[in-house]
Image: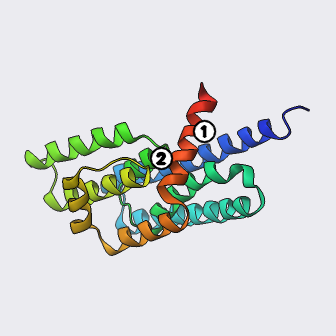
Amino acid sequence: MASRGQQETTRLKQNMEAQMERLVQQLIDLEECKDELEPEEYQETKDETLDQLKEFKHSLDKLLQGNLSLVDELNGMQLAIQAAISNAFKTPEVIRLFAKKQPDQLRQKLSEIQRDAKIGKIPADQAKQQTVEILTALKNLGEELTSDESFYLQSNSSASMKQFEEVAMTMGGGAALKVAGNQVQQANK
């Protein structure tokens, strides 16, 4: 009785995170199996998953309108879903790390991409796209970018990425994600 909804809020947040994780994992699995699927089957499955993400976002929007105690925590998930829906982020792994507020893992992924690009393991355009995604995610998580990273991001951002940035800023963007991340870390202690 003394929790006054805290346990329910925690359970709801965990359920929402699990749902988001499932949908992002579905996108990752789909990308990994892309070569094994017919192009029509791949596109249909991807469209269905994006539709599910849109429905999930709609549910989050409703929650955010009526339950202010969840606002900070749900904003991070909402931004990650917006990124997936808007096609600003094309790499499901980056969406996952962004949604889970894992800047260290994003930095590690950035190093791997730069290494793979140097040795020719991934095409330059793919490396550029993923680098921009990671730098955008880091920026929206409130991480400090170097001057070179900021310049690279500014010079190479696509229109959809810039649109995502605008959405992130109007929703409270990095500040809201940072607050939510801090609350999650304190709750886990």
User: What is the spatial separation of the Cα atoms under label 1 and label 2, in whole angstroms?
Assistant: 24 Å
- In this figure, which residue is indicated by the disc labeled 2? 25
Residue 188 shown left or right of residue 99 in the figure = right
- Give the farthest residue toward the top: 189
Local secondary structure at mark 2: helix
- Give the farthest residue toward the left: 119
Q: Position of residue 136 (x, y in %)?
A: 35, 57
Q: Residue at x 51, y 53 (%)?
A: 175
- Give the farthest residue toward the right: 1
Q: Residue at x 28, y 67 (%)?
A: 157
Q: Residue at x 43, y 40 (%)?
A: 102
The amino acid type of the residue labelled 2 equals: Gln
Q: Tag count in the figure? A: 2
Label 1 Cα crowd, 10 Å radius (few <14 / some 14-19 / many 20+): few
- In this figure, which residue is indicated by the disc labeled 1? 183
Instruction: State whether residue 58 is above or below residue 123.
Output: below
Q: Position of residue 187 (x, y in %)?
A: 63, 31
Instruction: State whether residue 103 is above or below residue 132.
Output: above
Q: Position of residue 142 (x, y in %)?
A: 42, 49
The quarter of the rendered structure image containing the N terminus is top right
The amino acid type of the residue labelled 1 equals: Gln
- The earlier-in-sequence mark between 1 and 2 is 2
Local secondary structure at mark 1: helix
